[in-house]
Structures are given as structure tokens and as C-alpha cells.
Amino acid sequence: MIRAISKAIAATLFTLAALPALGEDANLCGGLGVNGQWLGGDEASSDITTSPAYIERMALVLMQNEFVGLFSVSQDGNYRIEAEGRGGGDTVLDVRNASGDIVASDDDSGGGASSRAENFLPVGTYCVSMRSFDSSPITGFVRAGRLDQEPLTPGIVPPTNEAAECDLSVAQALTFGQPVANTWAEQNFYSFQIDAPAAVTITAENQDADPTLKLFDASGSLLGNNDDFDGLNSRIDMADMLPAGQYCVALDVYGDGSLPITMTAKIYDAMEVQMNLYARGDASPPLDGSYPVKLLGELQTRLRQDVNVSGDAAWYTFDIYDTGLVLIEAIAQGEGDPMLFMYDDLGRQIGHNDDNDGSLDSILTVRVQPGTYLVAVRQLDDQTQGPIRMVFERYVPARP
């Protein structure tokens, strides 16, 4: 325990030198972009619609931190965002729009342990964050560009015959709000019709099959894709209105194609999306009583809490009145694989950990200023459930 605390405290003595994003509002990407770096070197050179080549940054990420890069899009279109660690480092990639909503997330679609997302992005400014899958230090590259530009990663080819286009002639029609289940071998194309402009959500669920999704319009243009949105399940959220017409969904799998996969098309629900972000620990909830958060009050020295949780996070909030260091542990009591997330009161993620020091338990060590902080704990997925012991400890600087 002493060794773990010493290592964690030592890690806080290092910070990643990051130039503040020039001219960016402090609320960009939900506050995540306040210390981001323009991938092209400056704002003018970071528009990947007009950039003559891809833009890229080398990043050093220390324990329990992440690198945040900024780029912009001046024309709606399909773009590629990638992250690759040196020496086989396992990267995790999240892309957020200016409001802070996650529009793409990936772990290993770049091939090996690299990350890669190819998505339709509307005009706007975006933040791409790279972190290490196991929260260990990592050096890597983050690249953004158009699909016609050189990729950073090789990508991966699924063990199935992935179609380049969606075949409406053999697609099974989906009725909004009514899930259907087929094996990939039986059915891998689906369609839906909207009679008036609408925002939609498409999901594919069965973690053992590890499904992937691609959404096309009737002309064959790719509108969006996703892999591993929630565990190994996939989800495409088209928050912007789609025109009336027919759409095609291509389903593929990385896992067992003989297992049933539940496909659902439904009207996009912004509140549901926000609630899901809170449940996964990907965003912090408000403290107005509209979402369950346990109030711990002032964290003075040491506090212990036990919680029985599954894939949906349990949330805590505490107050700090002096500068210092906070150490938080999540220890599985029996079978379990807990994950930890920590945010400040403005909704900025300031810590994340999974599988600390070779174990399935998690630990966070964060230097704090006076303020209110939120912590989420959850199991790795809904298939895991069990009690977790939480320990909150506060350390103050030594006085001369």
C-alpha cells in the first residue's frame, strides 16, 4: 500500500507541457479543450477540411492523464481520427464536439492496440483525447485528416466479409422502437424509412459477437460508423436531423457471427444520451438533485464507502477546502473489475483509472485545489456485478 501511494504521489510531480488553445473559450468541449493543443500547430493550420496533408502531434501521457488535441472542420464530411502508441502502447481515443458530446470513441480499430475512428463530422471545432487503456504512461501520436490522406494506423479487417456498401435489396426493415434479433450469418443488412426529418439512434447489442455498425443513405454515402460504444456493443447517434428517406445499416462482427445480435432503430433522445454518459462515467451529472449523487461533505482525512454496482456508475461528491492531494481506491470485494472517474465541478475530467498496478482494482491520485469534486465508480460492464470498497484519503503539503 505504501509503495502504491508513493508511486501515485510521485506521478503527480510530473505534468504534460501543453500550450493553451489560442482563442478558445474555457467551455470548449465541456471544458476539456481549455488546455488542448492545436494538432496543426495553431488554429489556422488545424482545419482538416482544407489542410493539404494530415495534421499530427506527438504526445506524452503520464499516469492517469490524457492528451487533448484540437482540430476544426469547415465542411461537413467523413474524416479519420487516429491514435497510436509507441512500442505497442494501448491507446484509447475519444472525439468530442464543441459542446462536449462524444461523437466517436475507439480502442483497437487501428489494428493491434492502436485507435482509429472514421466518422461523418459536421462543421465545427473538435477535441480528440488520447489516454492509455490501463492508465500507464504512454508516448504516442494523434493524427486527424480526410479519408484521402495517409492514415497513421493500418486498421483491421474483421474476420467476416465486410461489405464496402450497404445492400438495400436484401436489408431487413426495422420499425422504430422495435428490436429485432438475428445472427450475423442470417442477416447483416438492415434498413429504415423516415417520412420527415428526424434524429435517430441505431444500436447493435451482443458483447460476445462484438458487433460494428455503418450507416449509409440511399445513395450509398457513409453517414456514420461505430465500434465498442458500450463495452463491445455498438451505437450510432445521429443527433443532427437526417432528411426524409430510406437508410441502410451494415452490420459486421469481430466475434462469433453465429450469436444473435439485437438491432434497434429509434428516435434520438438527447436526455437518454445524457443519462447514458452519466451512467458510463463519461460525463459528470449536475448537482441539482436531478440525478442520484451521494454527498460526502468535506473530505477531511480518510473515508470508506461500500457500494454494490454493475456497469452503471455510482456517483459521489465531496468538498475540499485546502490545496492538497486526494487518493481514491476502488477495491473489488470478490469478483469484480471496478473503474474510477473523477471530475471537477465544471465537468472537466481530471482523473480516470482501470486495472492499477497489475490488478483489476483501480486507484486515482489527483492534486486538488479548494472546490467540489465528483467521483464515479462502476464495473467494467453490465456482465459484472458485485460489491466494491471505496476509500477516499486526503493528504496535505508538508509545512516547513
Image: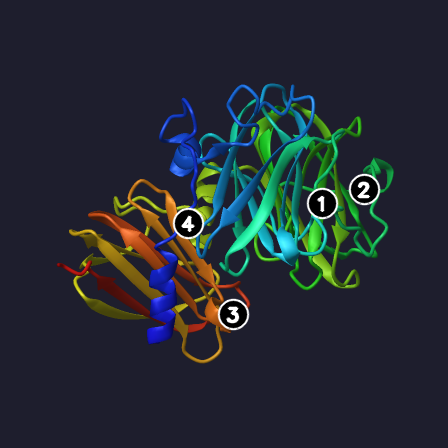
Between discs 3 and 1, the one toward the N terminus: 1
Q: Earlier in the sequence, mark 4 or mark 3?
A: 4
Q: Position of residue 113 (x, y in %)?
A: 66, 56
Task: Categorize mark 3 by other alpha carbons within 10 Å: few (<14), some (14-19), many (20+).
Answer: some
Of helix, strand and loop, which one carries label 4?
A: helix
- Identify the amino acid type marked 1: Thr
Residue 7, image x, y percentages: 38, 66
Mark nearer the N terminus (4 vs 1): 1
Q: Are the residues tagged 4 and 1 within 8 Å (C-beta)?
A: no
Q: Is residue 250 left or right of residue 399?
A: right
Q: CA distance from mark 1 to mark 2?
A: 31 Å
Mark 1 or mark 2: whose residue is earlier in sequence:
1
Q: CA distance from mark 2 to mark 3?
A: 34 Å
Q: What kind of element bears circle 3?
A: loop
Instruction: Tell me where residue 143 appears, x and y as whole percent.
Output: 63, 37
Q: Residue at x 27, y 46 (%)?
A: 287
Identified at 47% across, 70% down, the residue is 357
Residue 334 shows up from this direction: yes
Q: Provide the residue designation for mark 4.
A: 278
Residue farthest along the front direction in this orientation: 400
Amino acid type of the residue tagged 2 in the rendering: Ala
Question: Given contact means CB atoms under 8 Å apart, are the residues at marks 2 and 3 in contact?
Answer: no
For label 1, the residue is 153
User: Which residue appears at 52% of the width and 70% of the height?
Assistant: 384
Could you tell me which quadrant the C terminus lies in?
bottom left
- Within 10 Å of disc 1 (Cα), the crowding (few <14, some 14-19, many 20+) is some
Mark carried by residue 171: 2
Q: On the image, numbered disc 3 is attached to which residue? A: 384
**Three-letter amino acid code at the position of disc 3:** Thr
- Dot 1 falls on a residue whose secondary structure is loop
